[in-house]
Amino acid sequence: MADISAILKDSDFEQPNNYRPISLLPTMSQICERIALIQLTPYLLSNERLSVTQSGNKNSTGTPLIHMTEAILARIDKR
């Protein structure tokens, strides 16, 4: 279970769109996530299980959308 808090991201606190949800996880959950990250990342990288367009928190979500759009358009062009 996580506690969800609304954090103000812009100066106008009266606008609901200026808030973003933050999930506050228990310490044990954070430790488990960190252990999973440390163990899984080397495995996924060494066995080439991550796409080269995989972004996660590394890049914006726009990058994979651009790659996917390009792939779809390329397949349409081949028809």
Image (spheres, rainbow, N blue to C red):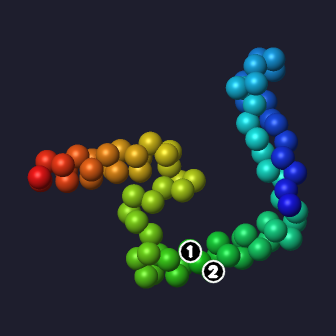
Q: Residue at x 80, y 35 (%)?
A: 7
- Picture coordinates of residue 44, whole percent (x, y): 50, 77
Residue that numbered label 1 is attached to? 41
Residue that numbered label 2 is attached to? 39
Relative side of 76 to 46, left or right:
left
Q: Which mark is residue 64?
A: none
**Marks 2 and 1, how far apart at CA:** 6 Å
- Picture coordinates of residue 15, whole percent (x, y): 76, 19
Closer to us: 65 or 40: 65
Indicate whether 11 appears above or below 37.
above
Relative side of 60 to 15, left or right:
left
Q: Residue at x 79, y 50 (%)?
A: 23
- Picture coordinates of residue 77, whole percent (x, y): 14, 48
Relative side of 25 to 10, left or right:
right
- Crowd around label 2: few <14 · some 14–19 · many ≥20 (10 Å): few
The amino acid type of the residue labelled 2 equals Gln
Quadrant location of the N terminus?
bottom right
Q: Quadrant of residue 36?
A: bottom right
- Picture coordinates of residue 5, whole percent (x, y): 85, 42
The amino acid type of the residue labelled 1 equals Thr
Q: Quadrant of residue 37?
A: bottom right
Kind of element beneath mark 1: helix
